[in-house]
Image (cartoon, rainbow, N blue to C red):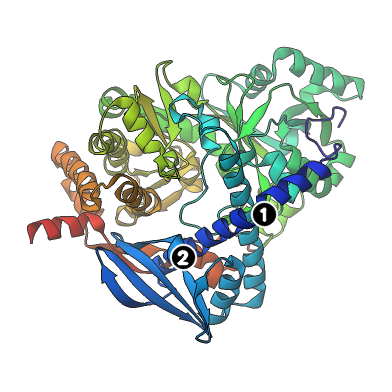
Amino acid sequence: MTEQLPGSHGQTRGPATLAAIREAVDGDTWETVNREMVAKAIAELLYEGLLAPEPIWASDGRVQYRLVVGETTYRFEATPRRFDSYYVDPASVERSVAGEEWVLAVDAVRFLRELGSNLDIEGMTVSKLIREHVNTLLVDAHVRTRRENRESPPNPTELSYANLDAELDGHPWITYSKGRLGFGYEDHHRYAPEQQPSLRLYWLAARRTQTTAETVSGTDYESFVSSELGTRRAGRFGEMLTERGFDPENYRLLPVHEWQWHNTVATFFADEIAADRLVPLEAGPPVYQPLQSVRTLVNTTDPAAHDVKLPLRMLNTLIYRGIPGERVRLAPQVTDALWKIRNGDSFLADEHEFLLPGEVASIDYDHPVYDEIDGTPYQYQEMLCAIWRESITECINESEQAIPLSALLYEHEGTTMLGEFAAAAGVGVDQWLGDLFDVLLPPLLHFLYQYGVGFSPHGEDAIIVIEDGLPVRAGVKDFIDLTLTETPRPEQSPFSPECWDALVTKPLSRMRQCLVASLFVCVFRYLADLVARQHGYDEDRFWRQVRERIIAYQTRFPELTDRFEECDLLAPSFKKICLNRNRLTEYGYRDTAQRPSITVDGRVSNALSEVARDQES
């Protein structure tokens, strides 16, 4: 590369990172994040049925449990919640070995080792699991240190989408939520969202015959990339190709994340570079900031410009963070289809003004070797591509603020983002939650029942638009996990045959997990617990509000009754999705040709059914 990037591998950061780690692993901070991780692990493994503690006593809604793990006994206090969940008080978790005195459980690694023995988990899995958890602990320690060192917390009502996203704590369900295997310590400082780094992208010229480039209707790839780069820099790249004896018409421009260049492109694609099918250029002018997914970057030079999503061959949460080629190629087509549905339905477009930040352009580069080998690990099939998505900032009005739904799970020393927004609006938690459910649930229900389209509206991909402190509308981004009904319907005609071939399809009865697992279990059960603990808000009232919005939607559209019955969100129970089991007991860390399937084990009680039953009794 001819131009060195800020914070690139050409700079030495050793002394700075050494000082940072010394501060982060300060005794009190390190004990705190360990204690919180042990509590989180116990709570989530209880939910997934991997632990079976014995209740000792109960008082005022709290229960003390005893858990025997080999020669070690743990005791802790927990509050049982709906959806078979628990809030485990980190300050209450203690351990005793062979009947000795009780001490605070402040060693997450020790807990994982004991857990591995107790559950008979392979040593290879336990060892790598410890590595992921230690990475997560280190990130959590840095985040806690940063929060404690600043004079005052930021006002969430004044933060940009990207800066607010940087304040968040990662996946609430997966215990190793910031494992990021593949990142070194300095990589965390350079590329992780909590560091709010400023990044610039490397650019390559890719032989046109090796690429597939797509855009939404009304534009073309070359014009789009030129507008993103700026015509001056795009022209400069063309001149660089000409100076090296290449015809620019035979190439397409393709951006690469700096980490991906050093760790994947320069090695896995060395033959392509040698054959001039990939021609390294230099860094582009725009500066970007990563979101929680790490691989999605927001343009901070021009917030109205498009976000860009790039593959990273880094293992985080359940999968390597590449992007499947067939989904990349079809992203603009899927966007066109969703826009056509939304814009043609007054309930979605006018009444709810539902946001769908479009994935408007994409490019995929096929690896000439790995893509042709049967059984190639999927991480080698998702290495070089890009998707551009509309900026959320450009999708809202000047008086509005967009936040990820996951922002509502933020809490620190008694402060919650939900509480801050409610205070800014001058309303109570009950009204604020009611407005949230009013703007978020009906559009998602309508896409599911009217159009057989299931999003994955977990905390990072669901968008809440705030005005004067109150939720006024909602949206969803990232269409890569879109699900369609197994049997096509006339109202799904905007989706091309190619979309049907690439997207996941399921019977409508199984598509309820798009809301149950992604929204109710992955977000709402944590939000219900948070407002109960921090704001004294009745948990059952929370779930009754959700139930009321579902029933109101069903009353509004009685012609869909058969579909409501087939895809029943008010059923007594559902199959239980178990995200932590994926790593612990199913897949471990082995390479597979396909992305791991989500583990299902047992059933989970439905809070929406329970609150109705309890109210009747």
Q: Secondary structure at mark 1?
A: loop
* Mark 2 neighbour class, 10 Å CA radius: few under 14, some 14 to 19, many 20 or more: some
Q: Indicate the position of residue 469 as horizontal and vertical percent values.
A: 34, 26
Disc 1: CA contacts within 10 A as few (<14), some (14-19) or many (>=20):
some
User: What residue occupies the far top of the structure in this picture?
Assistant: 232
Mark 1 lies on residue: 25
Q: Amino acid at mark 2?
A: Thr
| Amino acid type, label 1 | Val
Question: Could you tell me which residue is drawn at 45 percent across and 61 percent down?
Answer: 91
Of the pair 145 and 46, the residue shown nearer to us: 145
76, above or below 379, in the image: below
Q: Between 327 and 574, which is closer to the camera in this rendering?
A: 574
> Where the C terminus falls, by quadrant?
bottom left
Residue 247 in picture, x, y percent from top left: 84, 23
Q: Residue at x 49, y 38 (%)?
A: 478
Left or right of 93: which side holds 257?
Answer: right
Q: Secondary structure at mark 2?
A: loop
Q: Residue 181 or 587: which is nearer the viewer? A: 181
Q: In this rendering, is residue 121 above or below 365?
A: below
Residue at x-position 64% and y-position 53%: 138
Does residue 29 appear to the left or right of 475 in the view shown? right
Disc number placed over residue 613 in the picture, else none: none
Q: Going 43% across and 65% down the picture, which residue do you hit?
A: 92
**Residue 46 image offset from top left, x and y in percent:** 40, 69
Q: Is residue 399 visible?
A: yes
x, y percentage for residue 386? 64, 36
Residue at image mark 2: 599
Going from the N terminus, do you reach mark 2 or mark 1 first? Answer: 1
